[in-house]
Image (tube, grey):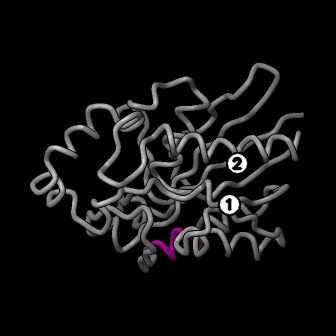
């Protein structure tokens, strides 16, 4: 027996559709994201879930709750699963940040492991808090299937931590889209990545909405 994690990135939000940073801010799911959520429930409700851990952000809750209700599993909220705090970049468009915070943005992109957006978090800080949640889960559950509903950057960073990838390279190594599922099995030899950013459960219309 082994413990398998399913990392679900929340559905597309208004911020991600508009190309704006959203880490510490709440955001609403788009109508298309609701279709993603419904498709996820249909595809994954037959799995025997041990538990469901989620970020307390409302767009993560809106993504996780339908499955939790369908399978009768109580959700466990953990702040360690929140998205990276993008500091002064929050609510700003990607292009606006590049133009108006070029120095801070450049420093961040050079080495996000140790450099953060101004007043935001580094990827090392995100890894520290999120991996505490993973350690908690692994301590409580030795076998079975665990759903973790979190956010794009946080999932990228957790996967880098599992795979021994430099935390400063998470943007260059792993692509995580809205509504995607990444699967990691823990066995006697440690973490095994079985699925990365999979959205094969989606209908073609939703799959074409790339989202972040």
Residue occupied by mark 2? 133
The outermost residue toward the left is: 99
Spot the residue most to the top. 189
Magenta span dominant secondary structure: helix
The reply, left or right, for residue 209 in relation to residue 106 is right
Q: Which residue is mark 1?
A: 78
Location of residue 119 (image quadrant): bottom left
Is residue 211 found left or right of 43 in the rendered image?
left
**94 in the magenta segment:** no
Q: Residue placed at 67% from the left, 37% from the top?
A: 184
For marks 1 and 2, the one nearer the N-term is 1
Instruction: Determine whether label 1 and label 2 are within 8 Å by CB.
Output: yes
Extent of the magenta region:
33-37
**Residue visible at 66% across and 62% down in the picture:** 54
How crowded pointer 2 is (Cα within 10 Å; few <14, some 14-19, many 20+) is rated as some
Q: Quadrant of residue 87?
A: bottom left
| In this picture, residue 76 sits left or right of residue 179 | right
Q: Position of residue 113 (x, y in %)?
A: 41, 34
The one nearer the camera, 129 or 184, is: 129
Residue plotted at (81% across, 70% down)? 74
Residue 185: x %, y % from top left: 73, 35
Viewer-closest of 37 and 78:
78
- Circle 2: element type: helix
Q: CA distance from mark 1 to mark 2?
A: 7 Å
Query: Taking 178 as reference, is 62 left or right?
Result: right
Q: Split into 4 quadrants, where in the image is the N terminus?
A: top right
Residue located at (75% from left, 70% from top): 68
Numbered circle sitting on residue 36: none
Residue 142 at x, y = what percent? 88, 39
């Amino acid at each position: 027996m082994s413990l398998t994690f399913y990392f679900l990135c929340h559905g597309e939000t208004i911020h991600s559709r508009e190309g704006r940073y959203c880490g510490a801010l709440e955001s609403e799911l788009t109508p298309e994201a609701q279709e993603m959520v419904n498709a996820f429930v249909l595809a994954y409700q037959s799995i025997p879930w041990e538990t469901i851990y989620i970020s307390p952000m409302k767009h993560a809750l809106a993504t996780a709750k339908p499955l939790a209700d369908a399978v009768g599993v109580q959700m466990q909220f953990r702040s360690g699963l929140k998205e990276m705090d993008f500091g002064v970049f929050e609510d700003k468009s990607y292009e606006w940040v590049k133009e108006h915070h070029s120095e801070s943005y450049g420093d961040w992109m050079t080495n996000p492991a140790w450099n953060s957006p101004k007043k935001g978090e580094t990827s090392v800080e995100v890894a520290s808090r999120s991996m505490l949640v993973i350690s908690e889960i692994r301590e409580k559950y030795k076998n079975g299937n665990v759903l973790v509903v979190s956010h794009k950057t946080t999932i990228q960073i957790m996967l880098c931590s599992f795979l021994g990838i430099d935390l400063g390279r998470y943007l260059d190594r792993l692509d995580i889209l809205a509504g995607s599922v990444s699967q990691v099995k823990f066995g006697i030899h440690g973490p095994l990545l079985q699925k990365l950013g999979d959205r094969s459960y989606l209908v073609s219309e939703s799959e074409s909405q790339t989202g972040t």
